[in-house]
Image: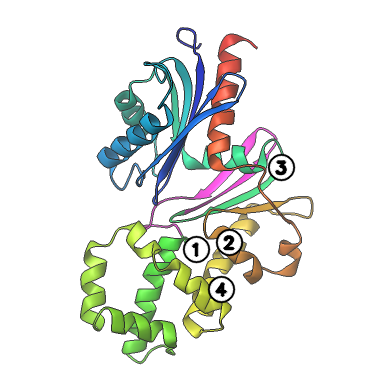
Amino acid sequence: MIDATPRYLVGVDGGGTGCRAAIADLTGRLLGQGAAGPANATTDLAQTIVNVRVALDAAAVGLPAGALKHSVAHVGLAGVLDGDIARAVAEELMMRNVTVTDDRAISVAGALGARDGVLAAIGTGSTLAAQRGDSILRIGGWGLNLGDQASGAWLGRELLEHALLVHDGLADGCALSAAMLEAFGGPGGIVRFASKARPADYAAFAPRIVAAGQAGQAAGRLLMRRGAAYLMDVLAAMEFGRDDVLCLTGGLGPHYAEHLPEEVRTRIIAPEGSALDGALALAKAAFERGTGR
């Protein structure tokens, strides 16, 4: 049940590049928004909590003191791999009525609403979810060290690996791979960068990879096709059928459309809303369940 009488709905969408917060009244009318830095709970839990608080405080500017405590909140963050992490975030936020989940839940709610289909949310990280009725099958989202295939971070890391293969004479070079070797002063610079790089650092190369693929450069084409092949493997595992729709979201997701087979491209739809919209929708649903509406 909802604790006390809430006055506001709060939604948070946090990922490897940044986090956003929104506050609405109980009808869903938007009252304020805020943004802050990265919020991946596995990569850096302490900084994630700091950044979520900054975004929430920015969204609450102009509202009465204590607005956040008198709310029903849904916080969706990358890297919430289990209940322990979710509870740790919730305890630090000190909000009476808060649900913390991974960002897949809010992405599905925002993009698909109540519609059956598959969501491919691809930004700094990647995750896919198939929604059929009340059931959601999730694949991926395990972080760059063990997954996040097709993501911006994965593409950036693959690009640097490809540049090293070009240096060693094991892959065909192109303008992009040459530019990487030059920018880092050779292989040693790439290795030093990789020893300290975080997902967002790798993802910074993604726009150049997308552009290179569109320009027909070998590295860009190769990496975008590898990412698209992974997406097709996941769709097959989800038994993606003729009646299903596909929603490509995130900063990188839509760029994969041209690399997918035509029979899949014809099933692509625009998202109904953003992940932040989904977070607010889930907060509203929790409020309505808790009050018996």
Q: Which mark, residue 116?
A: 3
Q: Classify mark 2: residues with Cα within 10 Å, few (<14), some (14-19) or many (20+).
A: some
Instruction: Report the amino acid beneath label 1.
Output: Ala
**Mark 3 or mark 2: which comes first in sequence?**
3
**Mark 2 or mark 1: which comes first in sequence?**
1
User: Residue 257 sits in which quadrant?
Assistant: bottom right
At 50% from the left and 78% from the top, the residue drawn is 212
| On screen, residue 164 above or below 23 | below
Looking at the image, do the residues carrying marks 4 and 3 touch, with CB atoms under 8 Å apart? no
User: Residue 50 sits in which quadrant?
Assistant: top left
Question: Magenta residues, as a range?
Answer: 126-148
- Does residue 127 show up magenta in the picture? yes
| Residue annotated with mark 2 | 231
Q: Classify mark 4: residues with Cα within 10 Å, few (<14), some (14-19) or many (20+).
A: some
**Mark 1 or mark 3: which comes first in sequence?**
3
Looking at the image, do the residues carrying marks 2 and 1 touch, with CB atoms under 8 Å apart? yes
Q: Which mark, residue 225?
A: 4
Looking at the image, do the residues carrying marks 1 and 3 touch, with CB atoms under 8 Å apart? no
| Residue annotated with mark 1 | 150
Residue 150, percent from left and from top:
50, 63
Residues under labels 2 and 1: Cα distance? 8 Å
